[in-house]
Amino acid sequence: MSLMKSVVFVAGTAFVLGSGQARITQTTAAQEKTASTAQKSEATGIAECDKYFAMVSSCVATRKMSTEEQQTAELNVTRLRAMLPIAASSQGRATLAQRCTASIEIGQKNDKYGCYKAETKAGREK
């Protein structure tokens, strides 16, 4: 019998879920980077979410954000990615698309680093 485990990385801590137990372990920066890179490359099939994840990823990559801001941005992505299973239903997919759209709008509104300038400009030209 194989056991399925889920690992969620959040700011230096791995939450390992499986076999009815939850275990919290400290992770290295290299482990987090590997997990983060793998998550970033996975397309969701929901255009709004893929767009939001790409925007956050490119903004974090600029290194303009403070470490705390980067962690918050990545946590927001992790939380939205954790909701992907609800996309199996059409109602869940629509809900997730709305949340990602709202996240894009909030990101554009609060963009103090110029990370989302191109997206904001493109949205105004439509």
Image (spheres, helix red, strand yellow):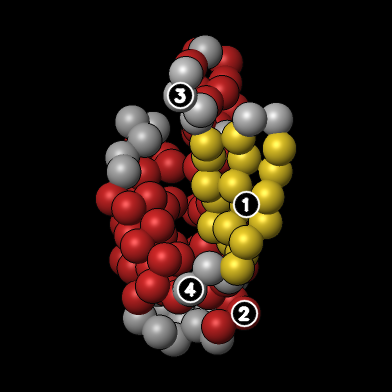
Q: CA distance from mark 3 to mark 2?
A: 38 Å
Q: Position of residue 46 (x, y in %)?
A: 39, 32
Give the label, 2 or 1, closer to the camera.
Answer: 1
Rate crowding at label 1 as few (under 14), some (14 to 19) or many (20 or more) other CA atoms within 10 Å: some
Which element type, helix, strand or loop, lies under badge 4? loop
Instruction: Examine the rendering and report whether any part of residue 105 can be seen.
Output: no
Q: CA distance from mark 1 to mark 4?
A: 13 Å
User: Label 4 is placed on what type of residue?
Assistant: Thr
Which element type, helix, strand or loop, lies under badge 3? loop
Instruction: Examine the rendering and report whether any part of residue 28 can be seen.
Output: yes
Q: CA distance from mark 2 to mark 1?
A: 20 Å
| Residue bearing the label numbered 1 | 15
User: Label 3 is placed on what type of residue?
Assistant: Ser
Return the disc, 4 or 3, that comes first in the chain's sequence: 3
Q: Residue furthest right?
A: 21
Return the disc, 2 or 1, that comes first in the chain's sequence: 1
User: Label 1 is placed on what type of residue?
Assistant: Phe
Q: Position of residue 9 (x, y in %)?
A: 54, 57
Q: Position of residue 93 (x, y in %)?
A: 50, 23
For the residues bearing labels 4 and 3, Cβ distance under 8 angstroms: no
The numbered mark at residue 2 is 3
| Residue bearing the label numbered 2 | 68
Would residue 93 appear left or right of 122 to someone viewing this image?
A: right
